[in-house]
C-alpha cells in the first residue's frame, strides 16, 4: 500500500503483462495454450451434446456433468482468450479497462465458487449411488438435482459480491501494470494505494468458507464411498471402483490444492511467477482434465459417443 494523495490520477485502465518472463517463446506458449483451450471446448461441448442426445444418459450423474461442462467452457473463456491476445499483441490484448478488470474478477470468482459446489454435489450423488443404492431414487430425484444445481449457481453468484464491492472501493493511482495473465485479487491489491486490510481479511474468510464447506462434503462423501468399497468382496469390482475414485480425487485434489494455496491467505504473495504457474493449473489444466476424468473415461459416455459417431457415419453414406 502506498500513501494516497489527492494529486494522484485515478487509474482507468490496467496492463496485464501475462507471462512476460517467456517473451522469447511467446508464440510457442500461444500455440500450447490455444491447443489446451480448444481441447477443453471440444471435450466439454461433446459431453453436453452427447448427454442431451442419448436418452440412456438422462440420469442425475450426467445432469451434473453437463452443468460442469457448461461451467468449464465459461470458466476458461473468461481468461484464456484475453491471455492469448496478449501473447501476440492483437487488439490491445494486454490492456483492460478498470470496469472490465472488476467484471472479469467477478465472473471468474463466481464460476470458481460454483465449480466447488458442483463438485460437492457430484460427490454427494456418487455417495448415495454407491453407499445407499436402494434409496438413490428418492434421495437424488430430478427435483433434488434441479434444486442442488440451482443452489450451486446461486451461492456461486453471491460469493464474489462483497469482495468485488470492497475492491471497487479501493483507490488505484499508479502504477497500472498487473503482473498476471488475468485480473486476480492478489496482483490488484498489490497495486492499490488504499488500506487493503479489510479487503484481504474478507477475501480470506469468503475463500475459506467456500473451500471448507465444499471440500468437507467431498471428503465425507468419498470417505464413505471408499469405506463401502473396502467391503466389496469381488477384487475386480473393488479395483475398478477404486480406480475411478482415485482418478476423481486426483483432479479434485489438484483443483482444491491450488485454490487453497492461492486464496486462503491474508497477505499478497511474494512469488508472482510461481502464482501464475499455480493459476494455470486451476484455470486451464483442471478444466481440460475434468471431462477426461469424469466422463470420457466412462464406458457409458464412450458408448454414447460411439453410437453418435455411427449414426453420423451412416447418414454420410446416404
Image (cartoon, rainbow, N blue to C red):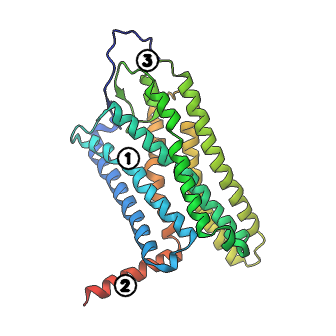
Q: Nearer the viewer, mark 1 or mark 2?
A: 1
Report crowding for label 3: few under 14, some 14 to 19, many 20 or more residues within 10 A (C-alpha).
some
Q: Secondary structure at mark 1?
A: helix
For image coordinates 45% across by 32% down, the residue present is 272
Q: Position of residue 307 (x, y in %)?
A: 42, 83
- In the image, taking residue 266 as reference, residue 4 lies left or right, namely left
Q: Position of residue 252 (x, y in %)?
A: 58, 54
Q: Nearer the N terminus, badge 3 or badge 2? A: 3
Looking at this rendering, what residue extends furthest in the bottom direction?
318
Q: Quadrant of the C terminus?
A: bottom left
Q: Nearer the N terminus, badge 1 or badge 2? A: 1
Q: Secondary structure at mark 2?
A: helix
Q: Nearer the N terminus, badge 3 or badge 1? A: 1
Could you give the CA–CA distance between mark 3 and mark 2, rounded to whole angstroms?
61 Å
Residue 193 is tagged as 3
For image coordinates 64% across by 73% down, the residue present is 240
Q: Does residue 111 appear in the picture of this structure?
A: yes
Image: 54 above or below 173: below
Q: Which residue is mark 2?
A: 310
Asked whether the residues under the numbered discs 3 and 2 touch, taking CB atoms below 8 Å apart as contact, a structural biologist would say: no
Image: 296 above or below 281: below
Report crowding for label 2: few under 14, some 14 to 19, many 20 or more residues within 10 A (C-alpha).
few
Instruction: Indicate the quadrant where residue 312 lies.
Output: bottom left
Q: Which residue is mark 1?
A: 78
- In the image, taking residue 27 as reference, residue 172 lies left or right, namely right
Amino acid at each position: 500500500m502506498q500513501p494516497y494523495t489527492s494529486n494522484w490520477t485515478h487509474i482507468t485502465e490496467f496492463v496485464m503483462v501475462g507471462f512476460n518472463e517467456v517473451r522469447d517463446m511467446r508464440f510457442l506458449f500461444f500455440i500450447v495454450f490455444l491447443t489446451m483451450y480448444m481441447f477443453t471446448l471440444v471435450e466439454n461441448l461433446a459431453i453436453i451434446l452427447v448427454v442431451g442426445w442419448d436418452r440412456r444418459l438422462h440420469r442425475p450423474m450426467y445432469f451434473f456433468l453437463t452443468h460442469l461442462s457448461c461451467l468449464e467452457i465459461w470458466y476458461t473463456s473468461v481468461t484464456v482468450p484475453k491471455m492469448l491476445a496478449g501473447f501476440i499483441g492483437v487488439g490491445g490484448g494486454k490492456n483492460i479497462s478498470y470496469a472490465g478488470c472488476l467484471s472479469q474478477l467477478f465472473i471468474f470468482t463466481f464460476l470458481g465458487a460454483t465449480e466447488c459446489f458442483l463438485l460437492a454435489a457430484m460427490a454427494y450423488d456418487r455417495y448415495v449411488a454407491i453407499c445407499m443404492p436402494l434409496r438413490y431414487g428418492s434421495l437424488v430425484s430430478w427435483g433434488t438435482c434441479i434444486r442442488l444445481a440451482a443452489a450451486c449457481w446461486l451461492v456461486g453468484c453471491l460469493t464474489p459480491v462483497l469482495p468485488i464491492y470492497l475492491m471497487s472501493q479501493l483507490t488505484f493511482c499508479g502504477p497500472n501494470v498487473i503482473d498476471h495473465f488475468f485480473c486476480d485479487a492478489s496482483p490488484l491489491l498489490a497495486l492499490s494505494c488504499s488500506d487493503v486490510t479489510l479487503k484481504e481479511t474478507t477475501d480470506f474468510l469468503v475463500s475459506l468458507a467456500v473451500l471448507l464447506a465444499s471440500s468437507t462434503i467431498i471428503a465425507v462423501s468419498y470417505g464413505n464411498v471408499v469405506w463401502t468399497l473396502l467391503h466389496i468382496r469381488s477384487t475386480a469390482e473393488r479395483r475398478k471402483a477404486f480406480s475411478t475414485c482415485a482418478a476423481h480425487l486426483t483432479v479434485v485434489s489438484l483443483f482444491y490444492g491450488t485454490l487453497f494455496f492461492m486464496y486462503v491467505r491474508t497477505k499478497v504473495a511474494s512469488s508472482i511467477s510461481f502464482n501464475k504457474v499455480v493459476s494455470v493449473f486451476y484455470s486451464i489444466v483442471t478444466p481440460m482434465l475434468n471431462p477426461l476424468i469424469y466422463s470420457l473415461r466412462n464406458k457409458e459416455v464412450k458408448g454414447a459417443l460411439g453410437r453418435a459417431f455411427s449414426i453420423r457415419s451412416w447418414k454420410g453414406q446416404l
